[in-house]
Amino acid sequence: MNPFASQDIDARARQLLRTLISQYLSDGEPVGSRTLAKSSGLEVSPATIRNIMADLEEAGLVASPHTSAGRIPTPRGLRLFVDSLLELKPLPRDDLARLQGGLPPHQTTTRDLLGNVSHLLSAMTHFAGVVSVPRQGDFPLRHIDFVNLPDARVLVILVFSDNQVQNRVVQLSRPIDGRELEQAANYLNAHFAGFRLADIRAHLAAELREAGGELNRLLASAVELATASFRDDDTDDVLVSGQTNLMGYSELADIDRLRDLFDAFQQKRELLQLMENCVKAPGVRLFIGEESGFSALDGCSIVTATYGTSGRMLGAIGVIGPTRMAYERVIPVVQATAGLLSDALNRAVATS
């Protein structure tokens, strides 16, 4: 937790810090005492401002670059600004309309929708847009079909509530004829449409223990097929768009820093871990500089928000940019996009 809460500095210092950070976020240049005297609206002398700035620097909230007499905010100062001094407003109607217009008007697969969202976030903020992809097993099953193949193999066709279709070829311990396959498919569709794969497996196992006779034989086939078909082989993934946007910001222009950053985008391991951590804490989250815990992202800020269906968190979306970003605009963009994505997924599930 930040030890420098807003109540630890007086009203003049808060106003000057807010003015300095707003000015810095706008033009990216160190802010001098004379500029602060003109812009802050306070009736104080440049000398008084310099004294207050010295106190803020001692508190670790601002820093003085060696090449300038002005000051810039530190990550700690930016954190205080966002938590205590920033006034967030609802997303302007035009921006909200642009977001709504950027999402597909018709049903599409979840992965296509998420790819669209990552591009939209990048276009709206001019940063990198990131979206974590949920496992397909997080979506209810709509329909299942089996097609017999040679050598005790079966083609499994899974249709999920988000319109995603998966084809899997499974190897069984014994051949199952077409009639058994049809009976098993009819049973699964009649009893388990609308369930998630893990829940279907659990229900089938419980029913098999209690069943007998002909039903037991039918369930045995269904359980074997479900066990083979519903394996959890989805790999975690995160979609990234607009990485090259970050090359245009002087703060990230260092070649070594860019190389580390683009390696992180390509490998995705750290991004996946970060987004998974965000899903565990629903809502909007902000990481400034080293707060992310990953050295490749030390020079960046990451704004994320979770999305899901019917109260179930499925993933997170966000943007990655320099610490000098317009937080008052980026945060509402990410928050609103997450809400629109959740609405789109809820509609897809409701109409399935």
Image (cartoon, rainbow, N blue to C red):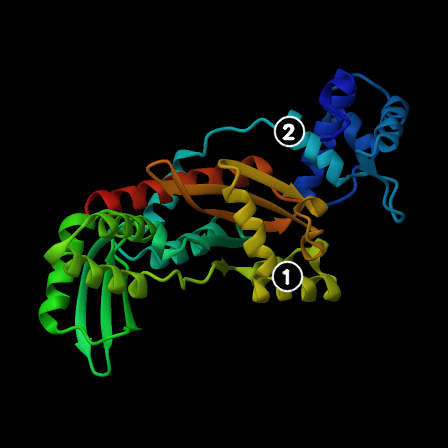
Q: Quadrant of the N terminus?
A: top right
Q: Can residue 95 be seen by looking at this rendering? A: no
Q: Give the alpha-carbon distance from disc 1 to disc 2, as whole Å.
A: 28 Å
Q: Which residue is mark 2?
A: 83
Q: Mark number for residue 81?
A: none
On screen, residue 92 versus residue 5, left or right, reads: left
Which residue is at the front of the view, 317 or 66? 317
Image x and y of residue 132, in percent = 47, 53
Image x and y of residue 219, in percent = 19, 57
At numbered mark 1, what does the secondary structure look like: helix, strand or loop? helix
Rendered view: 288 above or below 59: below
**What type is the residue that disc 1 sits on?**
Met
Which residue is at the front of the view, 232 or 216? 216
Of badges 1 and 2, the one in the foreground is 2
Image x and y of residue 205, in percent = 28, 52
Q: Which residue is mark 1?
A: 247
**What type is the residue that disc 2 sits on?**
Asp
Which residue is at the front of the view, 167 or 339? 167
Few, some or many C-alpha atoms within 10 Å of disc 1 (few <14, some 14-19, many ≥20)? some
Image x and y of residue 290, in percent = 72, 47
Residue shown at 24% from the left, 75% from the top: 174
Q: Earlier in the sequence, mark 1 or mark 2?
A: 2
On screen, residue 103 versus residue 305, left or right, reads: left
